[in-house]
Every structure is written in structure tokens, then in C-alpha cells.
Image (spheres, rainbow, N blue to C red):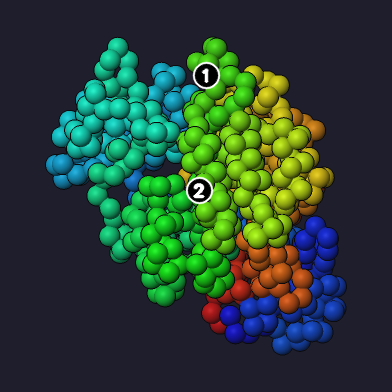
Amino acid sequence: MGQDVIFTGGRVFRGLAGGFAEALAVRDGLVLAVGTEAEVRAAAPQARHVALEGRVAIPAFNEAHMHLLPYGLALAGVNLRAEEVRSLDEVLARIGRAAKEAPKGAWVLGRGYDHAELDIGRHPTAAELDRVSPDNPVFIVRTCGHMGVANTAAMRAAGVGHNTPDPEGGVVERKGGALTGLFQERAMRLIRDVIPEPDEATLVDAIERAGKHLASLGFASATDMNVGMTAGMAEVAAFRSAVAQGRSLMRMWNVLAGNPEGIALKAWEAGLRPMQGDDMLRWGAVKVFADGSAGGLTAAFFDPYLESAGGGTGVFTFPDDKIHALLKLFHEQGWQLDIHAIGDAAIEQVLVGMEMADSEAHPFLGRRHRIEHCGFLTPHQRKRMLARGILPVPQPAFMYEFGDLYIRNLGRARSEEAYPMRTWLEEGHHPAASSDCPVSSVDPFANLFTMLTRKTNRGTVLGPNQTLTAEQAIHCQTWCGAYTQFAEDRRGTLEPGMQADIAVLSRDIFGCDPELILRDTRADLTLRGGEVIFDRHGALAPC
């Protein structure tokens, strides 16, 4: 940014420990001073001035669990999210329009439908998709990302027929012996493996597109949680190119796809190593899936889903011996483990594997291994996680978007105890609030609202004893995310010497009505290392 800048005229949230200050100064990409206005002006007497005018400056948000590149690609695809699409007719209309605009035979991809929110109360079928796209293969993915529906042309392209067996950890749905088009968990690879991979230019465009959107929401740091599942090793090259070209706006903590169909082993053979890179692109972790989603009835539980929802106990992605071997391998290679587990049975499977991998030669403490989502766990499991420094990386927004579906699938009692943010904080777990975008909206204000109220998008309050203060909620979306990425010494608070990753919000959210945070708050200015990456009103336009 060159010139020193000071922020005055509104509160500056330094962090959970530091509380509030009157003003802040930035120099050479770092926080120079924070304190009273007089102190800050004295530290930077020639600084350019930004008037907060009653707004608040906070550490920029850190999106600790999302899928940035797939989100960028999805922004150019067919949007089927429940905020806009609540009927089968609308699903088919959007897919039909896209098919008419596409060349004959080209794939039509959609993302974000929620069968529980559709008027039909079920997944669309292949036959229904065939009606609007008979000549183009179609694959639409449910909001959770753990299942999707293919039309007949897509299944034909994949060589899937009525005798195709279910792959390990996956389900190809049939009714009356006929394929419905629904593919769950690892069965989705049957379709995804035949979808043409985007070229590097398309991937870089997606990285830039997603980064710009996140910057407009107040983010300066993000993740791609499963690198390699769309275009293989080409995604590694695309992230490197995006950074080299100055088109990657976020500080990226990237996580390699560690399932056997992923790229973690190939990346290792190619020389990629833990913590390789810098603050703009660091390769830190490997992800393995243990189960699916609670909304989709594939998260693995000890106690079954309600009979009225379909029953069953969910889907384990791997048997114990296979997932435990993967955890041991990646732990001993030095990677942070970022393991997807939502149901208590899947969390148990993961914890047992982690405990088995913890050894004198390769100790767990200090490694900051993570259980992603970690939605429905027991007190004993929390205790074991704390003992080994295993971090939960939850998505409060799941409670907002899917809480009522949890009640329908699991009952009220289990839903009340899901994603226990206050308990995690009080026990010292450092929960990094995130969105899992594009599973849920990346909007940080929906996450804040949910942490403050525990309300679903239908107004149901689930677990009011787990609400947080605004200060705690911001802490979870900033410092805790930095902590999971070994970066809390550089960002996540606004103290002297920290990176000047700053978001100026349109209102002071501390103490205001949570409904205003959800409905009428936005980011006005976002800095990354003092550099403007979003400026709604031109407050720091070049002089």
C-alpha cells in the first residue's frame, strides 16, 4: 500500500484477549500501532486517514474449511442452492436452460440442491433430468457434496448399468432393480471420473473468481480442503500459477485429497512436502473421508437415524484397517491430518486410528491434527481430542442451513447437542468456525448469526446453552482459523507486528441485534498485508 494508513472514528477489535482500541495504524503490510487515537496518530503522523464513522475494524476473516477452487468453478455453473431453488420444476428449468445453451454432448453441471427443501421432498431422478437434457450428460450435486444425481447420458458415458456394483464406501441407488441416478459418497467417482477436466486457464480463473468473492465478504485467508479431486495434479499447478500471476487474492492453506482416488501419494512422489510454500500458498495437510453427511443420511452414527427418515446408521467410507493405515501413513510423512468425520461412530473410528498412530517416534502433540466438521461427538471423545491437541473444525452455518433437517433425521435431543461451540471454547479446543462452502454459503455473517443465536433459517433454536458472544464468534472465525494453520503468530489479531489483514464492517456488530448482522451487515473494506483486495466505497483508492 506504500503510505502509512490509520483507522479512527470507530472501534478496532484487536482480538479476544486484547479487546477494543480507538485506532490502528498500518505500515509496510503490518500493524504498526493500536491504541488510543492520540497514540496511533503520534506513531504515524504522516499517515493517510480512513474514517470508520462508527463502523468496526476486525482481523480479516479466515475461512478454515472450504473448497475454494470447486467454489470458483461452481460460480460459473448452474446454481441450485435452496435460497433460490425450492421446487423440482425450478431445478429442471435451470438445467434445461443450461442444456439448451451448451453444445450437444457437453456436460451440464449443477451444485447445491437440497432434496429436503424441494417441494417433492426427495432427490430428482435420472428420468426427470432426461426430460430437459436428453442429449447432454448432466450431474447435479447435493449441497452437502456427498451425493449427486446423474441423467441417463451421464451414466452411459460412465459405463454405469443396472449390474454395476457398489464401490467400497459408496452407493449406486436402485429402486425395483432400476437405477435412479443417485450416487452417494465414493460412488460419485464413477461419474466424476468421466467428466472432462478443466484446463489450467479455467482453474486459475476459478481461483481468482472465488478469491474476489471472498475478499468482498471480509476474508483474507482461505483453504482448499480437497485439492486434486476435480483435475488431479493440475490443481497444484493452477494454484502456483494463480499466485505467480497475482490472481490469488487469499492466503491459502491447501489440503491434498488423501483418499486413494486423490492425489496425496502422487504429490509426495512429485516432491511436495508438508509446510512447503509461503503465506500466500502453503501445502499443509492431507484430507481423508471417514463418513458422509447427516443431512444426507450418510454420516456414521452409533444410534440409527429415525425410522421416519429412513433409518440406518450411515456410511463408513473405509473399513477400520484401511482408514487407520492412511492416517498412520500421512501422520508419519509429516502432514497435518484434516479428517472428515461428522457422526459419532465416524469420529470414534478416526480417534482410534489417530491414537494408534501416536507414537514416541511420531508424537501427536504439537501437530494440530484436525477433525473436520466433528458435528456429533461425545464428551469422552472431546476429552481424548484435547489430550492429543486434535482440533475440531466445525461449521456453525450447518445449524443455520440444515438444523431442521437434523431434527427430522436424528431427533431433537441429538440435534441440540450438535456443533457445541461454547463447550469447545470453554474446554480449550480452539474451534475454527468455517462454512465448508460450497456446501453452505460462505457468508461469514450467517456463521456469526448462528453462533450468537443457535437459530436455524426457520427460526428454530437448537442448543441455546451453546451461544457465543460476538467477541467469541469473531475469535472463532479469525484467530482459531489461523491457529489451525500454524499462523496465529502472524494473523488472527490486530496487535503491533501482526500482518495487516483487516476487514472494515459496515456496522459495529458488537452488541447489535444479531438479525442486523445476518440481514444487513457487509464488508466495506478488506486488506491483506496492508494491500487493498476489496474496497466497496473507494476509501483507499489511489491518490
Q: Secondary structure at mark 1?
A: loop
> In the displayed image of the protein, which residue is found farthest to the bottom?
46
Looking at this view, is 405 or 25 the one in front? Answer: 405
From mark 1 to mark 2, how far is it between C-alphas? 26 Å
Q: Give me the residue at 31% from left, 63% from top.
A: 200
Q: Give me the residue at 34% from left, 28% from top.
A: 166
Please determine whether, in this image, residue 524 is positioned above or below residue 328.
below
Q: Give me the residue at 57% from left, 55% from top.
A: 331
Please determine whether, in this image, residue 329 is positioned above or below residue 135.
below
Q: Which residue is mark 1?
A: 312
Pinpoint residue 154: horizontal percent, then vertical percent: 23, 35
Q: Amino acid at mark 2?
A: Leu
**In this view, the mark in front (1 or 2):** 2
Using residue 24 as the reference point, say whether residue 181 is left or right of it.
Answer: left
Pinpoint residue 389: horizontal percent, then vertical percent: 72, 52
Residue 16 seen in the figure: yes
> In the displayed image of the protein, which residue is found farthest to the front?
360
Res 380 → quadrant:
top right
Q: Which residue is mark 2?
A: 326
Q: Earlier in the sequence, mark 1 or mark 2?
A: 1
Please determine whether, in this image, residue 29 is positioned above or below residue 386.
below
Res 505 → quadrant:
bottom right
Pinpoint residue 53: horizontal percent, then vertical percent: 73, 63
Q: Amino acid at mark 1?
A: Gly
Q: Secondary structure at mark 2?
A: helix
Using residue 519 as the reference point, say whether residue 116 is left or right of it.
Answer: left
Count up the numbered dots: 2
Pinpoint residue 114: horizontal percent, then vertical percent: 46, 30
Point out the image quarter for the C terminus. Answer: bottom right
